[in-house]
Image (cartoon, rainbow, N blue to C red):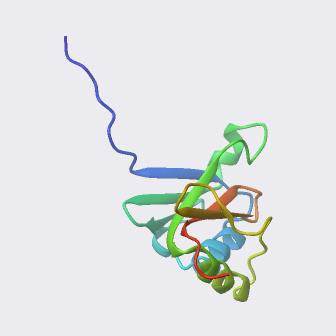
Amino acid sequence: MNHLKLSCITSIMLGVRDLKASLEFYRDKLGLKVKMQEAQLALLDAGPITLGLSLGHVRLAPQVNGATEIVFQVENVRAARQGLIERGVAFMNEPRQVTPTEWAVHFRDPDGHLLSIFGLGGAA
C-alpha cells in the first residue's frame, strides 16, 4: 500500500478584509517582501513558507480570525519587538520566557490574526 506523507508546509493563507491594509502591515511594518499581488490575493515571502493574504478566504469562514497563531523566528525578541514598535506595531504583552532558552511576545494583524515573534530574549 502506498503511504502518503505530507512532510512540508509551503504556504499559509490568511483571510483578510482589506488587502491594502494587510499589505501595509505585513510589508511595511513586518518587512515581508511581496512575491505576487493581484486584486484579491497577495503572496509574501516568509522564508521557506509563502504567506498568502486572501480576500476570497474571508467568504469561507463565519469569522476571519480563529484559534491560530503565526510565529516569526527572530534572533532577539526584545530587539525585534522594539523595532516593530517603532514601525507602529502594538503588542498584547511583554516578552516572556516560553522555553528554557527562548522568549515570545504576541501581537495582532489588522484582521485580528494572532502573531508572535520567538527567539532569544536579549538583555532586559
Position of 73 with respect to 49 (left or right) is right
Can residue 42 be seen here? The reply is no
- Residue displayed at 74% across by 77% down: 89
- Residue displayed at 20% across by 17% down: 2
Q: Nearer the viewer, residue 1 or 54?
A: 1
The correct choice, above or below, for 82 with respect to 39 in the image is below
In the displayed orientation, state which residue is furthest to the bottom: 86
Can residue 34 be seen here? The reply is yes
Q: Nearer the viewer, residue 107 or 82?
A: 82
Please tell me in which quadrant of the rendered image residue 117 appears: bottom right
- Residue displayed at 78% across by 42% down: 63
In the displayed orientation, state which residue is furthest to the front: 100
Q: Nearer the viewer, residue 100 or 13?
A: 100
Give coordinates of residue 12: x percent, y percent.
51, 51
Position of 49 with respect to 93 (left or right) is left
Quarter of the image with the N terminus is top left
In the displayed orientation, state which residue is furthest to the left: 1
Give coordinates of residue 6: x percent, y percent.
33, 34
The correct choice, above or below, for 60 with respect to 13 in the image is above
In the displayed orientation, state which residue is furthest to the top: 1
